[in-house]
Amino acid sequence: MTRSFSKHVLAAAICCVLFAGKASADTYTQTKYPVVLVHGALGFSTIGLVNYWFGIASALQSGGATVLQPQLSALNGNEVRGEQLLQQLRQYKAAYGYTKFNLIGHSQGGIAVRYVMAMEPDLVASVTTVGTPHFGSPVADGIVRDTAATGISGLVFSILSTLGSVVDFLGGTPQLPQNAAATFNDTTTSSAAAFNASYPLGLPATSCGQGPASVNGAPMYSAGGAAVLTNPADPSDALLALTSTYFNGATNDGLVGRCSSHFGTVLRDDYFWNHLDEVNMVFGLRSLFAPDPVAFYRSQVNRLKVAGL
C-alpha cells in the first residue's frame, strides 16, 4: 500500500512539473519574422550590462521572439544610417535565411526604418516607429540656428561627433563614421520635409493625422510620448526639460513633438513618457503612473504575431 501510494505521488509530482513547465512557456511575442530594434541618435545596442532597449529586448526574447539589434552610427545623416541598416538586414538574410523583418525604430531609428521600407520593401514585414521626428524637430531647428548665429557650429558638432565615436567604440563598432552636423541638419523641419518628399510612404496626408494602415502589404504603426519631467530621480529629465523649451509650449517628449511622431496607424501619441522613457531608459526610471514601456512593446509584438507576422 505504501509503495503504491508513493508511486502515485511521484507520478503526480512529475505530471505537475511537466504541466507547470508547459504552462509557463511564454510564446506571447513569438512572431514569424524576427523583430529588429533600431536605435536612435547617440544610441547603441549594448554597452557592458546596459541595453539601449532596457528590459525590452530581453522581454521580447523571453516571449519567444527572435530579436536583432543592429548598430548604426551613433550620429550621422538619415540616409547614411538608413543604408547601414539596409546592409545589415541583407547580411542577416544571407547568414540566417530570414526573408522579412518586423522593424521597430526609436527616434532617428524610425527614419532609418523608413529608408529601408522605400529602398527594399520585400524585406519589410511591418514597421513600428516610436518617438520618431517624421516631420522634424524644433530642437534641431533651434540648435542649428543658434550655433550658426554664435559661430560655434563647427566646435559643437565636432565635440558631439567625438561623443558619437566614444559611444560606438564602447558599443563595439568603432569603425562607424560620425557626423553630428548631419544628424541635426537632417532632423530640422525643413530637411525632414525634403526627406519626406523623397520617402513619403506611411506618412499622414493631413497635419497630425493618421497615415495608411499598410504599405505594400506591410502594416505601419507609430506611438509617442507627451511628457518631459516624469521622474525626479532621473537626471536626464533636466536635459529634456531644457530642450523642450524650443517647442514654445507645444506638446512634446523633450525632443519630438506629438504630431511629428505620427506615421501609419497611430496607436497613441500621448503616453506619459519622455523621449528616453519610450525605450525604458534610464534604467526604467519613469513616472509611477505611466504605462510600462516593456508591456507596450510586448503588446505591439503580440499584435504582429496575431497578424501572422
Image: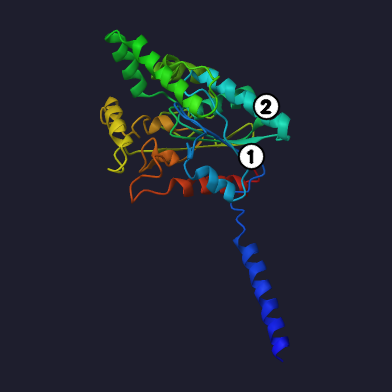
Residue marked by disc 1: 34
Disc 1 residue crowd, few under 14, some 14–19, many 20+, Cα 10 Å: many
Above or below — where is 25 with respect to 293? below
Disc 2 residue crowd, few under 14, some 14–19, many 20+, Cα 10 Å: some
Above or below — where is 143 with respect to 90? above
Q: Name the quadrant of the N terminus.
A: bottom right
Q: Is residue 274 left or right of residue 197?
A: left
Please, what is the three-letter code of the amino acid marked with disc 2?
Arg
Q: Name the quadrant of the C terminus.
A: top right
CB contact under 8 Å: marks 2 and 1: no
Secondary structure under the numbered disc 1 in the rendered image: loop
Q: Is residue 295 visible?
A: yes
Which residue shows up at 51% across the image and 18% down it?
197
Mark positioned earlier in the residue sequence (2 or 1)? 1
The image's mark for residue 90 is: 2
Percent x, y for residue 78? Answer: 50, 20
Secondary structure under the numbered disc 2 in the rendered image: helix
